[in-house]
Image: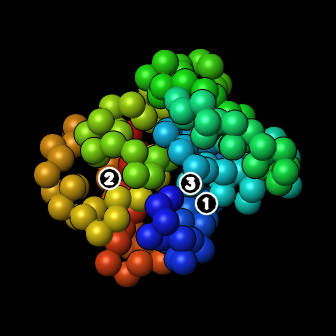
Amino acid sequence: MSSSTLASVWTRHVADSAQLLALAPNAKTWVDMGTGGGFPGLVIAIQLAEVAGAIVHCIESDRRKCAFLREAVRATAASAVIHEARVESVSAAATGPVDAVTARAFAPLPLTLELANPWLEQGAVGIFPRGRTAEEQLKAFPAPANYKMELIPSLVDKKAAIIRVRIS
């Protein structure tokens, strides 16, 4: 989060992240790739704090951000595990079965999907906020035939969208 967005932290970051839970309403186990300052992984983990068996695997390679995330998990009783690692070094076996995988402001769509693929192939739904260029990103990506990708309007920013992905 930059200082220029501090005044709009609630809508631009928290509410934008919180809306994702409804796009995978039965998901109890999540992976958040490149969690950064906690968006969306920590927000989802806080939302799931009182759901039995729920867990969010927050993957972040920056040691300082991981220290912050661990303290935030402790302070909020969020249902999260912090993995201090690069996404490509965390295997699907390390997280166990996952219902949903997400990433926000992480990487271009093709790389995001490539890194999410181990979880998507095991049945997880991908929930990827892509901002105001979501439609263009989707049109530019030659999705494999077994990918079902849908564009969902953001509830927070009417010009932005989220891409939901399933592998059939």
Point out the frontmost of discs 2 and 1.
Answer: 1
- Residue named by callout 3: 39
Query: In the image, 151: left or right of 54?
Result: left
Q: Secondary structure at mark 1?
A: helix
Q: Which quadrant, please, contains the C terminus?
A: top left
Instruction: Check contact, mark 2 vs mark 1: CB within 8 A.
Output: no
Which residue is at 33% across, 42% downward?
A: 107
- Residue named by callout 1: 21
**Gap between marks 2 and 3 measured at Cα:** 22 Å
Total marks shown come to 3
Query: In the image, 29: left or right of 163?
Result: right
Up-down: is 58 above or below 19?
above
Q: Secondary structure at mark 3?
A: loop
Q: Secondary structure at mark 2?
A: strand
Which residue is at 66% across, 55% downward?
A: 44
Query: Going from the N terminus, do you reach mark 2 or mark 3 first?
Result: 3
Residue that extends furthest to the bottom in the rendered view of this protein: 158
Residue 6 in picture, x, y percent from top left: 54, 71
Return the mark for residue 89.
Answer: none
**How dense is the environment of label 3, judged by Cα within 10 Å: few (below 14), some, or many (20 and up)?**
many
Residue that extends furthest to the front in the rendered view of this protein: 3
**Gap between marks 2 and 1 measured at Cα:** 17 Å
Point out the frontmost of discs 2 and 3.
Answer: 3
- Residue named by callout 2: 149
**How dense is the environment of label 2, judged by Cα within 10 Å: few (below 14), some, or many (20 and up)?**
some
Kind of residue at badge 3: Phe
Kind of residue at badge 1: Leu
Closest to the observer: 46 or 29? 46
**How dense is the environment of label 1, judged by Cα within 10 Å: few (below 14), some, or many (20 and up)?**
many
Which residue is at 49% across, 66% downward?
A: 3
Q: Would you say residue 39 is visible in this rendering?
A: yes
